[in-house]
């Protein structure tokens, strides 16, 4: 089954792609071998779109899709939505805003739930993005829930990270300054038809120039009004320029190290049942001589 799926995905079969993503999300039997069989050399470039809620990220992605489709490019969009508190699935807001692309054969859109992930991404975003790349897309756009100090993941996953802000984001910028400075390859001031856009752009440039990371002074700032398709061509020029830079970031190795640690941790803990552990602790604490750390040692010593 898995080999057949991989063959279908390599031919651009979006139904097979959707099925493979769902199976990997749910860790269906054989998914690790499937991931190991993915091609090592992939040409697709990954673009991360992030920023605070309300910045217009989905509208911006929709505008970029229009430009890329017009250039006959094949694009996949992974929209990482907040999880529903009841069903734990994605709320699907982003897909509603991009509904005009449903029947476009060169566009694939998939909503993913964060499932409690603190970095603003899906816990299996690396695996899913690798599966999508195997389908022969030119670009993979990953739109995240929001931005903050914990969102280092997108910087490691994307070839170019675009941080989307609005003119009123001055206070938000101050609150998350160091995180933004570290992850942004490109700043977008969206809804720039609003008052204060020029002043905000100048203040943002000043903040970058006085930051601790000297490289941020070279980060481009682009003003857009995505709802009116304004500034989108200029934005794509800057994204394309950054994608073709000779020197790339080393954040991916950090991201993969964190992911490897998590997977190894889960593998080594697979024989530990939390409910059984609770029952054992519950029985042990009735003993006055109970020592919690001695109990831990019984699990960690080999």
Image (cartoon, grey):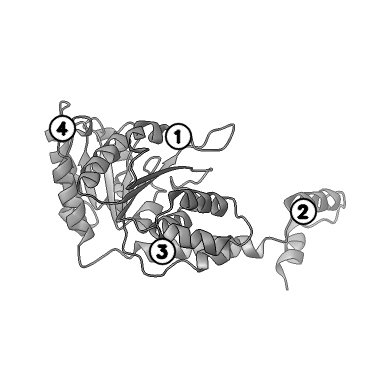
The answer to which image quadrant residue 198 occupies is: top left
The alpha-carbon separation of the residues under discs 3 and 4 comes to 35 Å
- Quadrant where the N terminus sits is bottom right
Q: Which residue is mark 1?
A: 92
- Label at residue 277: 2
* Pointer 1 with pointer 3, Cβ within 8 A: no
Which residue in the protein does label 4 denote? 197
Q: Earlier in the sequence, mark 1 or mark 3?
A: 1
Quarter of the view holding residue 223: top left
Residue displayed at 36% across by 43% down = 147
Assign the C terminus to one quadrant of the image. Answer: bottom right
Q: Residues within 10 Å of mark 4 (few under 14, many from 20)?
A: some
Residue 202 horizontal side relative to residue 36, left or right: left
Residue 225 placed where, x, y %?
A: 19, 33
The answer to whether residue 209 is seen in the rendering is no
Of tags 1 and 3, which is closer to the observer? 1
Query: Which residue occupies the foreground of this view, 146 or 201?
Result: 146
Within 10 Å of the Cα at label 2, are there few (<14), some (14-19), or many (20+) other Cα atoms? few
Against 168, residue 106 (above or below) is below
* Front position among marks 1 and 2: 1
Cα separation, mark 4 vs mark 2, equals 56 Å
Upstream in sequence: badge 4 or badge 2: 4
Helix, strand or loop at disc 4? helix
Dot 1 falls on a residue whose secondary structure is: loop
Residue located beneath label 3 in the image: 254
Indicate which disc, 1 or 2, sits on the residue closer to the N terminus.
1
Q: Distance from label 3 to label 2 (Cα)?
A: 32 Å
Rendering coords of residue 194 (x, y %):
17, 26
Cα separation between marks 1 and 4: 30 Å
| Residue 216 pos. (x, y %) | 21, 54
Q: Element type at marker 3? A: helix
Residue in view at x 23 percent, y 50 percent: 72
């Amino acid at each position: 089954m898995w080999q057949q799926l991989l063959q279908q995905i390599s031919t651009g079969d979006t139904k097979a792609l959707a099925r493979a993503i769902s199976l990997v999300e749910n860790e269906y039997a054989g998914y690790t071998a499937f991931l190991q069989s993915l091609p090592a050399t992939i040409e697709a470039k990954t673009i991360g779109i992030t920023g605070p809620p309300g910045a217009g990220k989905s509208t911006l992605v929709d505008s970029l899709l229009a430009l890329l489709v017009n250039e006959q490019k094949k694009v996949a969009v992974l929209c990482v939505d907040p999880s529903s508190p009841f069903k734990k699935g994605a709320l699907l807001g982003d897909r509603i805003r991009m509904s005009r692309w449903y029947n476009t054969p060169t566009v694939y859109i998939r909503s993913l739930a964060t499932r409690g992930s603190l970095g603003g991404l899906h816990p299996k975003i690396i695996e899913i993005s690798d599966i999508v790349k195997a389908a022969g897309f030119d670009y993979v756009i990953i739109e995240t829930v929001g931005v903050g100090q914990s969102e280092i993941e997108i910087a490691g996953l994307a070839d170019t990270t675009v941080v989307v802000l609005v003119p009123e984001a001055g206070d938000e910028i101050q609150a998350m300054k160091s995180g933004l400075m570290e992850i942004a390859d490109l700043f977008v001031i969206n809804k720039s038809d609003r008052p204060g856009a020029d002043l905000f752009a100048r203040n943002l440039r000043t903040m970058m120039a006085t930051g601790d990371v000297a490289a941020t002074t070279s980060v481009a700032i682009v003003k857009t009004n995505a709802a009116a398709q304004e500034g989108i061509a200029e934005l794509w020029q800057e994204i394309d320029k950054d994608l073709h830079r000779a020197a790339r970031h080393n954040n991916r190795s950090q991201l993969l190290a964190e992911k490897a640690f998590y997977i190894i941790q889960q593998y080594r803990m697979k024989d530990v049942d939390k409910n059984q552990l609770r029952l054992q602790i519950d029985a042990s604490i009735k003993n006055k001589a109970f020592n919690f750390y001695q109990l831990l040692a019984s699990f960690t010593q080999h």
